[in-house]
Image: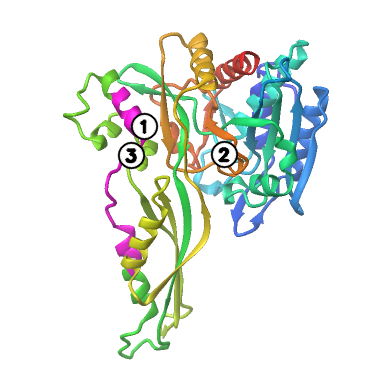
Amino acid sequence: MTSTSDPTLDRTAHLTRDLIRFDTSNYGDGKSNGETEAAHYVEAELQALGLKPQLFDAAPGRTSVVARVEGANPDAPALVVHGHLDVVPAIADDWSVDPFGGEIRDGMIWGRGAVDMKNMDAMILSSLGEILGSGRQPARDLVIAFFADEEAGGVLGSHFMVDEHPEVFEGATEAISEVGGYSIDLQGQRAYLVQTGEKALIWIKLIARGRAGHGSQINSENAITRLAGAVARIGSQEWPVKLTMTTRQLLDRVAGILGQDPKQVSAEELAIATGTASRFISATLRATTNPTMLDAGYKVNVIPDLAEARMDVRVLPGDEVEVMARIRELAGPDVEVVVMHQDIGLETPFEGALVEQMIASLGRFDPGAEVLPYLLSAGTDNKALSMLGIKGYGFAPLQLPADLDFPALFHGVDERVPLDALVFGTDVLTDLLLGY
Ligand SMILES: [Zn+2]
């Protein structure tokens, strides 16, 4: 399948819409609609550009696509430009449009994946089309990768590729991908946030055991009571604020732009002053421990002997041991804490030739804008690539309207992206790939 033609839509918008129409929902725990159809679509697009994409299945239906593009300077280390093809599920009843329809309304494309991250997948394909289609070459070799399974931690996507097929990343030292490069509004000053680090993630299960029995009897070993206590204690824990190299740098620059003295204003106040971006930034000032799933019982008058909860724990890079020790303490002696999935945190200094090129490319299309580093409260496939020594950044450039609550759209209802932001992003990305 190639893009359906609609003369009013530009190339990136076409690609984004087509990709949204593949329902690649990833439900976690190995349950997924799969990425194979979307992968074949991407494969055809890459082949049409004269590239030789390879497909890799970590499991049936779980397909990742990788292609190499030869750069003008074969001696420069390769750059990985990657996206993921899966999306989180969407409950259609909650949406004002079909989440897999790719509808265009109010100058935006709506649908699951519009910002996370079929937009960037499309921008990558479109930029390559711009460059190769006009007979040019990127400055250095590119490893173009579209991974499966990012939304479940990348076990069947980026981690599988890094573990089983590291040769495809041969010679690569840096990577760019999602959740960075978008603009925020700081009291009238536009600023772009480049993601230079990620918190570590630890997905845990709490297991409370107790004595089963009749719901009418006294039971001091009720598994649900034990679990609920632990969930409430951990979920409402106020973790201390701790600034990393990146958050310190970000907040100092934010203070400068807002004309505030960072010694007079708390880190939390400065984070809130970033407006909608504070959803991301406030969560990078401390650990977070959010209960997300509960499972217990089968009948109102029966006390079960087991109750379980899941939590999404995100900690600053390096704080894993300390936070997990405190979680076990808060859980108490009757509740077992099991780590289901864990992945590392990352932090890279905001400097070097690639960062300078990002600033230059953004500046070319938005003169006068500020470019700031930030730490991501969530994680990306850059975690897996870091295992190969590849330094990853979030750089999916988008110039956004000041009043759009962009961070809320990630995994949110009515996910959507402005059409002109896709044009901007493709231009900036093309400039970066030609210049770096
Ligand atoms: Zn994503």
Q: Kindly state the secondary structure of the residue where label 3 is placed.
A: helix
Image location (x, y in percent) of residue 219: 32, 87
Q: Please state the extent of the stretch shown in magenta in the rendering.
A: 230-254
* The label number, if any, that marks residue 421 in the structure image: none
In the picture, measured across the screen, residue 286 lies left or right of residue 34, that is left
Q: In this view, does 8 lie above or below 67?
A: above
Can residue 274 be spotted in the picture?
Answer: no
Image location (x, y in percent) of residue 68: 75, 29
Q: Kindly state the secondary structure of the residue where label 1 is placed.
A: helix
Q: In this view, does 236 lie above or below 76?
A: below
Q: Is residue 249 magenta?
A: yes
Q: Nearer the viewer, mark 1 or mark 3?
A: 3
Image location (x, y in percent) of residue 229: 31, 70
* The label number, if any, that marks residue 382 in the structure image: 2
Q: Nearer the viewer, mark 2 or mark 3?
A: 2
Q: Pick whichever of labels 2 and 3 is earlier in the sequence.
A: 3
Q: What residue type is labelled 3?
A: Ser
Residue at 64% in and 18% down = 433
Q: What residue type is labelled 2?
A: Asn
Residue at 27% in and 48% down = 240
Can residue 312 be spotted in the picture?
Answer: yes
Q: Mainly helix, strand or loop, the magenta region? A: helix
- Is the CB atom of the residue marked by disc 2 within 8 angstroms of ligand 1's nearest atom? no
Q: Which amino acid does label 1 sit on?
A: Thr
Residue bearing the label numbered 3? 282
Name the image quarter holding residue 237: bottom left
* The label number, if any, that marks residue 276 in the structure image: 1
The one nearer the camera, 32 or 196, is 196
